[in-house]
Amino acid sequence: MSLVLPDPTRRVPLPLREQADVRDRWLTQRLLDLLPGLMDRAGIDLWIVAGREYNEDPVLGTLLPATWLSGRRRTILLLHRSDDGVMPVAVSRYPIGQFLPAAVLADSGAGGDWGVVRRFVEQADPARIGIDVSADFALADGLSHTEHRLLVEALGPYADRLVPAERLAVGWLETRLPEEIAALHALNRLAHEVIEEAFSGAVVVPGTTTALDVAWWLRQRLHDLGVEPWFQPSVTLQRAGVPLVEQSGALLPGVPYDAVVEPGDLLHCDVGLTSLGLRTDTQRNAYVLRPDEDAAPEGLRALLAVGNRMQDLTTAALEVGRTGNEVLAAAREAAAREGIDADVYSHPVGVHGHGAGPAIGQWDAQTGVPGPGDYPVHPDTVYALELAVRRPVPEWGGQCARMGLEQGIALTAAGVQYLDGRQTELLLVPAG
């Protein structure tokens, strides 16, 4: 099982060395083509990203070469906006790829590493120095208390120029190159293929296999393919006679997580994989046929169609410039007009699974998310279009069923693109 990467002649998972080449090429392009505009948009002249080994700023790893699996000792990156673009400088004991060779800075002299930073600031004389502190976005809040104190002490009077780099950090993390979006198309295709394999007679034996068995099969399969999951896959069941249960204000499946799969069950999975420094987040659904069936009940198929309609309403509301809370409100208002019982809880996905950017609801926060929900939508971003709809199923005696959907989408100048398409038909598991 493999997938196509930006070059259609190549298929991946690539060997690790080739993955590193791709990632470093992307990093160079991002530094040249994306970062200057992002710094201008945020009004920041110098961006300082710093961290110590094992306690690193989440942004730091996205600025390091692929061979750097983590920071080393103290690693400080200085990204200075000049008329010629962005000049990156590393204050480190080790050479860092496309940044200034560390040997130049190895003898830091008076003040140690932070003394080097002070001298750089004195020479560059930036008006606004961005640092990663944020009350709303954990991914933009990576400067530790100690590092912040040492930086302020080293800068002296220049510390008055420090400003939060929240908008810059989020913009850097959420913005995707066309090549990265192409890779995410392929990665989502692989996720869909693995799920189709999981929800088949090759894995699921009704009356024997448990939902937990399938979840562990998914994790092992992704590991064996070299695309590690970034969270434990989950598989849940719904069935006639076992109604949904309320949890924190939401209606969720009431069948135990380790129950044996039976004919007539509705299966749902949540799966995310990692490759090339990018992540996916996908939910899909399957129906276990009864011995006398060759299709899912019409009521369940109609429920999936309602879920697809809710996806349409949400993507229609996803407009550049709107905040996440405004997208959520518009989608929910549209659903109410059409009589759709739905929850929307979509989020950015890319470098991180629950990525930086506008929060479009949360499963337990359907009136808006203060802070992350107030952040605006930007182009060239990728989201997990995540939502759920509920509706009575006639074939289940009018019992309400829930259809959870999650699908990768990209928002570009061309509009919303589904990454390898969305689920419009239930997968079918044979009765045995």
Image (cartoon, rainbow, N blue to C red):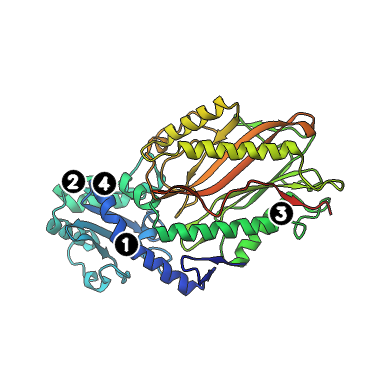
Residue ID at (55%, 29%) = 335
Circle 1: element type: strand
CB within 8 Å, label 3 to label 2: no
Circle 4: element type: helix
Q: Amino acid at mark 2?
A: Arg
Callout 2: few (<14), some (14-19), or many (20+) C-alpha neighbours within 10 Å? few
Between disc 4 and disc 3, whose residue precedes?
4
Q: Looking at the rendering, in which quadrant would you find the C terminus?
A: bottom right
Tell me the tag on residue 227.
none
Residue ID at (47%, 50%) = 349
Closest to the observer: 198 or 120?
198
Between disc 1 and disc 3, whose residue precedes?
1
Residue 340: where, in percent of width, then height?
60, 29
User: Could you say which quadrant of the image residue 326 lies in?
Assistant: top left
Tell me the tag on residue 41.
4
Q: Amino acid at mark 1?
A: Thr
Residue ID at (69%, 37%) = 302
Q: Which residue is mark 2?
A: 161
Front label number (2 vs 4): 4
Between disc 1 and disc 4, whose residue precedes?
4
Q: Amino acid at mark 4?
A: Arg
Residue 195: where, in percent of width, then height?
65, 55
Between disc 3 and disc 2, whose residue precedes?
2
Callout 3: few (<14), some (14-19), or many (20+) C-alpha neighbours within 10 Å? many
Q: Which residue is mark 3?
A: 199
Q: Extreme right residue here? A: 292
Q: Which residue is mark 1?
A: 75
Q: CA distance from mark 2 to mark 1?
A: 21 Å
